[in-house]
Amino acid sequence: MASLSLDDLTKAVSGGAAAIRTLTRLEPAGGPNDKVFPPTYVKERNAETKYAMEKRRVDGREVQTVLLDSVASQANRFEDALAEGWRRRELALPVVQVDFSKEAGLEDLEQITALHAPHRIADALLRDSLLEGVPFRQTATGKEITDAKPTHATAIYKYCPTALVFGVWDSTGPKGGLGAKFQRCLVSEIVGVDVITGVKTASRIDPAGIQTKAGPVYKHKDPSQDWTVDEGEAEKKGGKPVEFSRSTGGDGKKGSPSAINHGNIPPSIETDAGGVTMSHAVQTTVLTLAGLRRLRFQTSCAGERIPNESRDAAEVAARTALAALALTAIVYQRENDYDLRSRSTLVATGPLVFEVVGRDGGEPARFSLTKDEAAKLLKDAESAARKHGLGWDAVPITLVPAPKLAGLIRKSREVAASSEAEAGDN
C-alpha cells in the first residue's frame, strides 16, 4: 500500500475528496472474550446502567452498542499525542502556554498549553494570564485571536492551528457568547459492538481480623496522627469525641474501622456499572475536507493582504497543512495505544489505513502513513504553506498566570483540603 504523499493530500484537500477516514477494529487486550469497562455517566431515570448504551445499525442489523470513548475524549487524546511529539521536538507547530513553574505552591502545574486546556486557545486559563505584563486578550496577539472568524482564520491558524482541526468557540473572550465558532473538522469515537452488560463484585478480607465492633474510631486531635480509638486522644466537638470519616478513600460509615480502610467488606454485586463483553470495538475517525474548505485566509501570518491572484493557492496550502496536522495526530495517537482507563485497554487487529473518500462515491483510495512519514508530511505541508506567507512559528508563546488567577488556584486548593477535613467532622 502506498504512503500518503503531500501531492495526494493536496489534491484531496483542493477539491478531489470529501473526507479522509480510518476505521480501526479493536478488541480487549485480554482477548476477544475479556470484559472492558466503559466510562460512566449520571444514571438517568429509566436507565439500567451508567453507560452510554444505544442501538445502532451495524452490517445491516440492529445491535446493542456502548460508547467506550467519546468525541471530546478522543480529541483530548489526539492533542496529548501532538503535545508529546512537540515536546520531543519531533513536530514543529505553534503553541501558546501558561508557565506556572515559578509560582509558589503551583510549580507542579508546570506549563499548561493550549493543547491541554479544555477550550484550547479560547480557554479562561489563557485569558486570565499575562504576556509581558499585559492581560493576554488585550495584547496585539490576543486581539488578533478575538477578531478571527471562519472567513478570516489566519490568527487561529498562526497561533493555534489545532483549534481549527478540533474546533473552538471563543465564548470566554471579550465578545462572550458572540465570539467566533470554528467547527470540529476531525471527529473520532470508539464504540463497542454487540454488547452484553455484566456485573462487578467487591469484597475484602482483613488479614488482621479487625472487626466492625472494634470501633468507634475517632478523629485524632493531632492532625498528623489522623485517627485514634482512645477518647482521650480524640478531637472534641461540643465536649464529645468526633467520629472519624473521610470524604474520599474510606468505604465505610463514620466511626467504623472500614472508614480507615480496616476490617472486612462483605461481598457485594454491582449491576449498573459492571463492565461489558462485546464482539469487538470500532474506532471511527473522519477528517472532513469540506469543513477545512470553509476556512478562509485573507492575510498572511505577517498580517499582509494575500493578493487575489494567489489567494486560492495560499488557502489550499494552509488547509493542506491543517489536514496534515490532523493525520499526524491520528498516527501519533495510534502510537500511544488504546489504554482508555482502568480495565479498558484495547488493541488494534490490523494496521492503520487511511481512506480518501471521493465526493462522487466509488471505491476510496487507500493509503498508509507511519509515524516518521506523518512527521515529514506535516513538515513538508507547512513548508509549502510558508511559501505563501502561511508558515508557523514553533517557538512557544509563554504567558504567566495573573496574580488573581494564581490566587484563585491557591484558594481553591485550600478549600479542597478544608472540605476534606470538614467532611470528617460531619
Image (cartoon, rainbow, N blue to C red):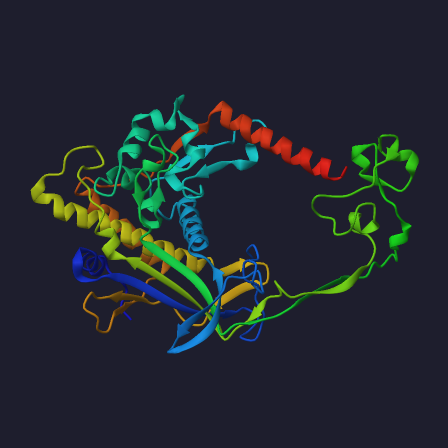
Residue 73, above or below 348: above
- Residue at (76, 39) in percent of width and height: 426
Q: Quadrant of residue 2?
A: bottom left
Residue 276, above or below 410: below
The image shows residue 256 at horizontal and vertical percentages of 83, 49
- Residue at (24, 74) in percent of width and height: 363
Q: Is residue 366 left or right of residue 267?
A: left
Towards the viewer: 197 or 5? 197
Residue 95, above or below 206: above
Q: Quadrant of the N terminus?
A: bottom left
Q: Residue furthest left?
A: 309
Q: Quadrant of residue 420?
A: top right
Q: Is residue 304 left or right of residue 68?
A: left
Look at the image and tell me whether residue 352 can be seen: no
Q: Is residue 200 left or right of residue 81?
A: right
The image shows residue 114 at horizontal and vertical percentages of 40, 40
- Residue at (25, 51) in percent of width and height: 292
The image shows residue 323 at horizontal and vertical percentages of 28, 53
Residue 410, above or below 289: above
Look at the image and tell me whether residue 323 can be seen: yes
Towards the viewer: 231 or 358? 231
